[in-house]
Structure formats: C-alpha cells, structure tokens
Image (spheres, rainbow, N blue to C red):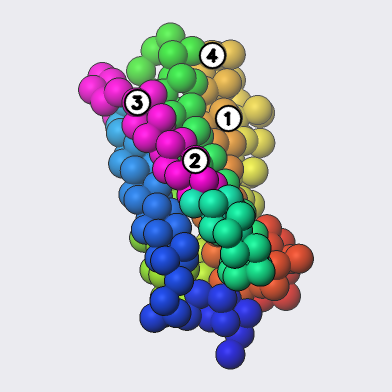
C-alpha cells in the first residue's frame, strides 16, 4: 500500500482525517466559486455581485478549524495520526491560499481603465478554462487517494505554467497600455499560482512527505 493510502485509506476510522478532508473539500468548492465570479468580473466585464472578502474569510476560518482540530488531537494523542496531521496542515495551507488568489483577481481588475476585450482577454479565458476543471479532479484525487487523478492535475499544471509564462512574455512585448499589461500579466500569474496550489495538494497523494510540493518530478 502506498504512502497516502496508508495514512488516509477510506474507513480508517480517524475522525481527524474525516473532518479535515471535509473542510478541504469545502474550501476548494468555495474557492472555485470565488474564482468563477472573479473571472466573470475580469474577463466578461461583469459587475462584482459577491462579497468575496466574506467568502475568503470563510475559507480562512475553515483553515483555522483544521489547525485547531489537529492541535487538539495531537495534544491528547501526540503519537496518533502525527504524519497524517503534518500532511493535512500542508494541504489546508494550499487550499487557503487559493481563496486569496481568487479574490486577488478582482482587486487586480480595479487597475483596468477599459473593458477587457480582444485577443489577450480571449487567450486568458482559454487558459482559465483549462484550469477550472482541476478543482474537481483535485478533490477526487485526495478523497479517493487516486494517484492517476493526482498526476493528471500535476501534469496539467506543468503545461499550464509554461503556457502562462509564454502568455506573459507576449503581453510584455505587446503595445498594450500600461494598465492593461499589468492586469493581463497579473491575472496570468494568479492563475499560475492557483494551479500550483492545486498541484501541491495533489502532490500529497503521489509523493512522500519530504517531497510534497515537488509534485512534477519523476512523473
């Protein structure tokens, strides 16, 4: 049995693991909702109609709940679920950061002095469409300890990272106004970071603890 399944096999009876997995799943769902709305605002020129700060606070509170649960659990049973607790802390930290970046897209949009239209908006929309399904695949990967699905996310992120880097280069070499160049380049970087955190979560499924967040090596 591999590392992740040894820690998180279904039916293990660990209330810590069950509670933490439910929280991480909820955080990913909330962050995906935030990202969807932020992309509508940024790329479809829609008004802000969600309280993204409140939603982000909910994601942050979920992270704090997991940390409190782990701390209380280890205070009572310091030898039980120790390695699993370390892995869960890593996962929940990445999940929390995704919410921050999703909210950051709208903050970035405030710099734009004109609507986001044209080829650069179209290209960024296509990249976002490749990123979005990775949320659900990530959730399935760690819920089911599915290494094949985890590797799918890690590889997709690696490809997306290269494409977004090339996109930022095109933006830098373009004749866009300064405000739009900052918006498009910054948005591409945010999408890259969201993908990186999803990949980090999936790396917990395929890598031993000391190699978590180095998920695209040897795959």
Residue depth check, mark 1 versus mark 3: number of the one nearer the observer? 3
Outermost residue toward the top in this view: 113
- Residue 60 marker: none
Residue depth check, mark 3 versus mark 2: number of the one nearer the observer? 2
Q: Helix, strand, or loop for circle 4?
A: helix
Mark 1 highlights which residue?
Answer: 185
Residue 129 visible (yes or no):
no
Residue depth check, mark 4 versus mark 2: number of the one nearer the observer? 2
Mark 2 highlights which residue?
Answer: 64
The residues bearing labels 4 and 2 have C-alpha atoms spaced at a distance of 36 Å
Residue depth check, mark 3 versus mark 4: number of the one nearer the observer? 3
The residues bearing labels 3 and 4 have C-alpha atoms spaced at a distance of 27 Å
Mark 4 highlights which residue?
Answer: 179
Which is more toward the observer, 122 or 188?
A: 188
The residues bearing labels 1 and 4 have C-alpha atoms spaced at a distance of 10 Å
Q: Helix, strand, or loop for circle 3?
A: helix
- Please tell me which of labels 4 and 2 falls first in the chain: 2
- Please tell me which of labels 1 and 3 falls first in the chain: 3
- Please tell me which of labels 3 and 4 falls first in the chain: 3
Bounds of the magenta segment = 43-68
Q: Helix, strand, or loop for circle 1?
A: helix
Quadrant location of the C terminus in the rendered image: bottom right
Q: Helix, strand, or loop for circle 2?
A: helix
The residues bearing labels 3 and 2 have C-alpha atoms spaced at a distance of 15 Å
């Amino acid at each position: 049995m591999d590392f992740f399944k040894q820690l998180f096999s279904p039916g293990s009876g660990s209330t810590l693991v069950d509670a933490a997995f439910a929280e991480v799943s909820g955080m990913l769902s909330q962050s995906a909702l935030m990202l969807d709305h932020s992309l509508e605002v940024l790329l479809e020129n829609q008004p802000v109609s969600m309280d993204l700060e409140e939603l982000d606070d909910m994601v942050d509170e979920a992270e704090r709940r997991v940390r409190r649960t782990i701390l209380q659990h280890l205070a009572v049973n310091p030898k039980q679920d120790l390695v699993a607790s370390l892995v869960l802390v890593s996962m929940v930290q990445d999940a929390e950061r995704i919410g921050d970046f999703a909210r950051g897209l709208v903050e970035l949009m405030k710099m734009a002095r004109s609507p986001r239209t044209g080829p650069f908006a179209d290209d960024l929309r296509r990249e976002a469409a490749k990123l979005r399904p990775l949320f659900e695949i990530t959730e399935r990967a760690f819920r089911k300890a599915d290494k094949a699905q985890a590797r799918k996310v890690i590889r997709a992120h690696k490809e997306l990272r290269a494409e977004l880097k090339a996109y930022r280069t095109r933006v830098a070499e373009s004749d866009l106004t300064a405000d739009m160049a900052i918006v498009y380049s910054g948005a591409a970087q945010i999408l890259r970071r969201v993908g990186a955190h999803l990949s980090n979560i999936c790396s917990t499924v395929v890598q031993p603890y000391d190699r978590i967040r180095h998920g695209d090596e040897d795959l």
